[in-house]
Image (cartoon, rainbow, N blue to C red):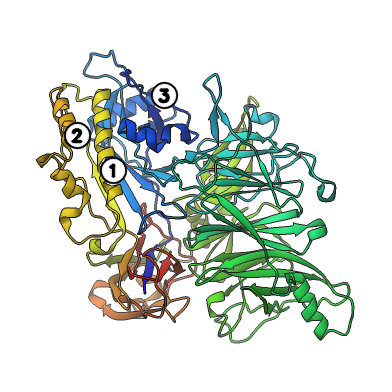
Amino acid sequence: MALIVLLALSVLGFIPSRAGECEWDVRLCKTEPVSTEMYCLRTGGMDVRDLDPVEMQKNMGFPYYLKLDLLCGFKESSGRAVLEDSITGLTPEAVVSFQEPTHPTHFRPQRLEVELSVASLSDNATCGSEMCEFSWYAPMPIINGSVVYRVKVKSTEMGSQQLHEKSFALNVNGYMVTTEKGENEASFGTEIQAIEDVLRVGSPSHPLWSVVDHAPVLLLPGIPGLAAVLMTATEFQHTSLIEVSLKSPSGSRECLQVESSMIQETLSTESSLFVIHNQELYRFLGNYSLLPLRVPPSDAWEKLLSAVCVSGLVPVSVPHHGREYFYVLGGGLQSGTLYRAEVYDGDVTFTELVDSIGFTACEIVAFYKNLKRSTVNNPGCQVRSAAQNAQTDVTDIILVELLFHEDQEHSYILLTFDGDFQMTEILPEFILYSQRQRHQETSSLNLKFNGMSLNPSTGILYIWGNSLIFSYILTWEEEQSFWHDSGFPSDQMIKYFTLSYDGTFVFVTEQEELWWGQERTDSVFRLRPSQGWNELSHLQALSGDHSTLTVFYDGDKELQEVLYTVDLDGKGSVVKRKIPVVEILSFSHLPFLSTCPFDLEYSVPHIESFNRLQRYSFNPQLVTSSSELHPTRSLALYQGLVYHLLQLHAQYLMVIGDPKESPISRMEHSCNGVLYKDFCLYLSYNNVSGVTTDSKGHITARLPDRVYLDRTASFSFSLFIRAHQLTLESIGERAVNDIRMFARVPNSKYLSVTLQRYVKLNYGGVLYKVTVTDKGMVEGQVFPGEKLLPFSVLFRIGISPRQCFQQTDRGMVLSVMLIHLYSFTLLFSSPFLTL
């Protein structure tokens, strides 16, 4: 029996920007064995050819280094800023996070971070001055099984300016090959350099579909007039326009579409790319030697479901039980059919969703409707969307649209499928607007829905179209109710909907309006167009014409906008910018004098012995030169040290109670015997050339986002909520007594939460002691870390206004996870304490 609970306390809001004139930048660099200088590469991701595990083992090192730089507008000012900040005490660090593969190969989840202090390396090997231009470098560690990497750059508060932390996606690009000339090109198509010849300002935006946090390469479709896609392995820090090389560009006779030359939809998984062209589905498997794939990489696009006209894809953004899923909607002669695709270790299989007697979803709906209607004519039927509920076993939720000619009583039906279809809900005409209302209100709006989205951690199913309704599917055994998100106009149609899986969502309408909302609230807010957006546009004016290509949440759950811009010289480029949701909403929706009426302080117990996040911290060697600049051989030694300890980490598969079995203990005692004799000799020989190595203190403990507890165990923490003075003045002294926090769990069968409240009048706040307990209701025995069931716990302060969007530089996020290590596991991931 096992239980995981993730409690994340995050406060949305606004603080004034403290950013200086510069910002952090990261590039991948390499050095040849005989070279004394670094050369940096294009930022299109890591080349799979350099990451062969056999080659890394042979060389006892990693192929890449990280170059940390400052972008200050001009190259000269950037170099000067690096020198000035270094002299005034700025010390940057790079934190590399490794994403475990969808199908872990270890006995337990491998959650790993490496914190690397930088080494200063001269940019000019012949410089003999003590004031040479230099850059900051650190090794780029690679581990077997991970193809998604995130690098966060942070620094001390010293230096000539204050710099915000910034993170970068540096993923492995398994879709690049090397030509005979030594140049890189895409393995599935041809790169187009002059993108202004293809892209057009004003083209509609398209959704960016991928498996969240697991897809190393993203594809964006919708290039007008050409079978092409935008490809990125860096979350659009660097983007390539690739013309896709398909075998049948004209499509089949039965599956022709109006826009036959355009890639209609794309989907990125951990190891494969899927595209729809002329209602035909194609797949390309990447070259990923770091992943445990069952099949070899592709040489060309492979056509799938050759006998099926494909009208669309429905992504399942969160993998389940070591597998990735998505749905395929049938079109043409197969209209009304639905297929579930399962990707496991690179191998893809398709299952048509039919019941035990061979009925499809539409056929079973027609069968039930004919039993209740005095007509022999079956209504027209179409599967609009599907979602996957994988709390225990995989259950499919299917949205079926009935196309009546006369009667418009019920036009949408929800089905569930677990081997047989069950009709769960006929969507009513009226909408229950809010749980807080005393009576139900009806709407005369003729509902039209385009799709569904499900967040497995909250159990909320969103159905969207010309309205947005949601339901808590984990309570469907008791009752089935739908609520309406107010604020969205009925004359708009939602084109695509995106969840952050961290408590928020956005959607884009057919008119390219951008809307934002929080989960478990009943209101949505328009970001664009709005007064706050107009003010932002004046402050962040882009030269030339531009239009939105897509919006998406990055690996840090920040909302990003991808734009196509054309400068005054007619040169086109694809750029990414963060959408400051907090500032936009605060500009228009804050009713309080302060941006948020409360402060939060929390305390948690020491949980290092329960977490599954291992964090290593490395410092470069000391150098004896007067300039304190490292030579390339010193950086190579630094890299070798990181490589050696991560090798020890890879051998440390299970959590063992004996501290002598830890990697750091083995590192400290490695030179006392003969086991690591060659490595110790390597260190001592390098000491002669002015380099020393400190092999102690490489592990640091930090509060992770997950804690693992045994069956029926509990985890407790304290939260102090203090009202601002402006809040006390605006709503009176009763604010302290009226501050109350509420907790909600999506399924009380497995989890209980208790809140103990203590009013602290002298401190102007309330102290809450929170305890989250596993009820021990999950049955079965599996390996630790397998079959994680996501649940979310929401904490809300009842007195606060609905529009309170406060956050800090670090996001004030506390994430805690509870688990029993021996069997079936529940993952409780709660993203927000909502004010």
Q: Residue at x 26, y 77 (%)?
A: 761
- Type of residue at label 2? Phe
Residue under pointer 3: 75
Residue 647 tag number? 1
Crowding at dot 3, Cα within 10 Å, few <14 / some 14-19 / many 20+, comes out as few
Question: Separation of disc 3 and disc 1 at Cα?
Answer: 38 Å
Q: Nearer the viewer, residue 380 or 667?
A: 667
Dot 3 falls on a residue whose secondary structure is helix
In the structure shown, which secondary structural element does the residue marked by tag 1 occupy?
helix
Please give the residue where the numbered disc 2 appears in the rendered image.
679
Q: Quadrant of the N terminus?
A: bottom left
Spot the residue most to the left. Answer: 672
Closer to the N terminus: mark 3 or mark 2? Answer: 3
Res 340 label: none
Q: Quadrant of residue 432?
A: bottom right
The amino acid pointed to by label 1 is Gln
Front label number (3 vs 1) = 1
